[in-house]
């Protein structure tokens, strides 16, 4: 009887409801917090992107209409004993805030007979005023064997908002280079 | 940034508050009411769990509307209790206290969060709502302060009404 009386007392009911309320409120707040903490990813146009340069057609530049985050230069040539230059093989445009960019090596055809036909393939970043920014990014094959001398690297350089830089490509083949020798190069444009 | 689920969280707290208040005033309400509000709060908790699991499936609009509907249900219950006390039980003093201490503040808080959410989402409520809300708050606060400072004011007003009636 006594226990029943205690159970039906107002204070007991209130304390029970208070405890369950605290439990529900805490659990709900935790679930809401976990919802807030879930990250979402939104796609948007890249702030630093490739755009067409004056020599993009000659270089065979293709990509997402050249307003994309990747580009393929499918028609770069190298003539025997000649240095061929594409002043604006493709351009890099910065439309957002200032960014740090650099070219980094990803892969290149190596260890094949094709490599021995090339002397060097050089990439440079050229500012709108025509001056070079950063250092050369060059694949050299000075001794003419089947392997490239070393993999090039570059430090980060700041490209400012609304600036457009050119990627200048210079190719040099050996004097007795055979025809239709193809080298595939994959270079990343790192952006910070 | 406020997620649409915030309205469900707010509604859960409202239901829990109602549960505790109706338990405190249990002589005036049916005995099952506090427990029903606890169950309503639990339903809201389930609501949040479903939202979390299907976050990528449900769109922002859909999440807003079902959470907003739940908030409307909670606010409807507050007003219903106010009306129940005033109309059904004829407890005018308690009904007035309830409207001043529970109904009005919670409605103002809800309007604030809903307008804030809609502003962040780019769907602005008419700015008139904010102005009307501020004016209403100022009036309620002014009347409350004047009654608090001079409790005879209400009696004087009542007497004046009665005199006018007899004239």
Image: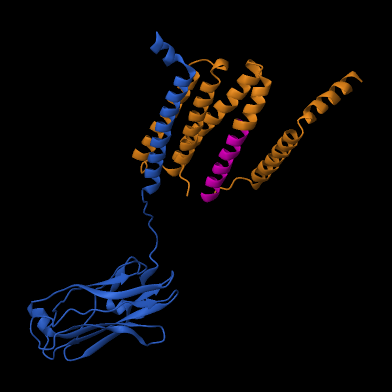
Q: Position of residue A78 (x, y in %)?
A: 20, 84
Q: Position of residue A57 (x, y in %)?
A: 31, 77
Farthest top residue? A1
Residue range in magenta is B103-122
Rendered shade, chain B: orange
> Does the rendering let one see residue A101?
yes
Please name whichever residue, B50 or B74, is drawn nearer the observer in this view of the structure: B74
- Identify the residue shown where x is 38% and y is 87%: A130
**Residue A54 pos. (x, y %):** 36, 80
Image position of B52 with respect to A38: above or below: above
Residue at image coords 27%, 86%: A85
| Residue at the right extreme, as displayed | B167
Specify the quadrant that holds the C terminus of chain B.
top right
One can see residue B54 in this view: no
Relative image position of residue B66 (x, y in whole percent): 46, 35
The residue sitting at 58% across, 43% down in the picture is B112
Q: Which chain is blue?
A: A
Question: Is residue B33 a member of the stretch shown in magenta?
Answer: no
Q: Is residue B37 above or below residue A116?
A: above
Residue A5 lies in quadrant: top left
Residue with the most extreme front position:
A2
Q: Quadrant of residue B54?
A: top left
Asked if residue B119 lies in the magenta stretch, the reply is yes
């Amino acid at each position: 009887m006594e226990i029943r009386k205690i159970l039906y007392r107002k204070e007991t009911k209130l304390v029970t409801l208070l405890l369950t309320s605290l439990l529900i409120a805490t659990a709900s707040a935790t679930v809401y917090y976990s919802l807030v903490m879930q990250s979402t990813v939104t796609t948007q146009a890249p702030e630093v992107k490739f755009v067409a340069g004056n020599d993009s057609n000659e270089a065979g530049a293709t990509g997402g209409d050249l307003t994309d985050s990747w580009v393929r230069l499918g028609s770069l040539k190298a003539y025997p004993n000649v240095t061929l230059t594409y002043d604006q093989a493709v351009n890099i445009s910065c439309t957002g805030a200032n960014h740090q960019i650099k070219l980094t090596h990803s892969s290149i055809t190596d260890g094949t007979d094709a490599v021995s036909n090339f002397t060097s393939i050089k990439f440079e970043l050229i500012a709108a005023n025509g001056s070079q920014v950063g250092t050369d990014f060059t694949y050299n094959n000075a001794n003419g064997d089947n392997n490239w001398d070393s993999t090039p690297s570059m430090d980060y350089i700041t490209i400012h908002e609304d600036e457009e830089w050119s990627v200048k490509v210079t190719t040099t083949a050996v004097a007795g280079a055979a025809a239709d020798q193809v080298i595939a190069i994959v270079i990343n444009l790192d952006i910070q | 940034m406020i997620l649409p689920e915030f309205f469900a969280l707010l509604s859960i707290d409202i239901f829990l508050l109602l549960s505790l208040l109706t338990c405190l005033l249990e002589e005036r309400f049916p005995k099952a009411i506090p427990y029903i509000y606890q169950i309503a709060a639990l339903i809201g908790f389930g609501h949040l769990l479903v939202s979390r699991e299907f976050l990528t499936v449900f769109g922002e609009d859909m999440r807003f509307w079902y959470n907003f509907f739940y908030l409307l249900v909670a606010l409807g219950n507050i007003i219903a209790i106010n009306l129940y006390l005033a109309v059904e039980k004829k407890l005018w003093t308690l009904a007035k206290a309830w409207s001043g201490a529970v109904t009005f503040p919670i409605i103002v808080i809800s309007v604030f969060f809903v307008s804030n959410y809609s502003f962040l989402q780019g769907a602005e409520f008419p700015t008139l709502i904010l102005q009307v809300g501020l004016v209403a708050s100022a009036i309620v606060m002014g009347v409350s302060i004047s009654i608090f400072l001079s409790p005879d004011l209400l009696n004087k007003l009542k007497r004046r009404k009665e005199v006018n009636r007899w004239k």
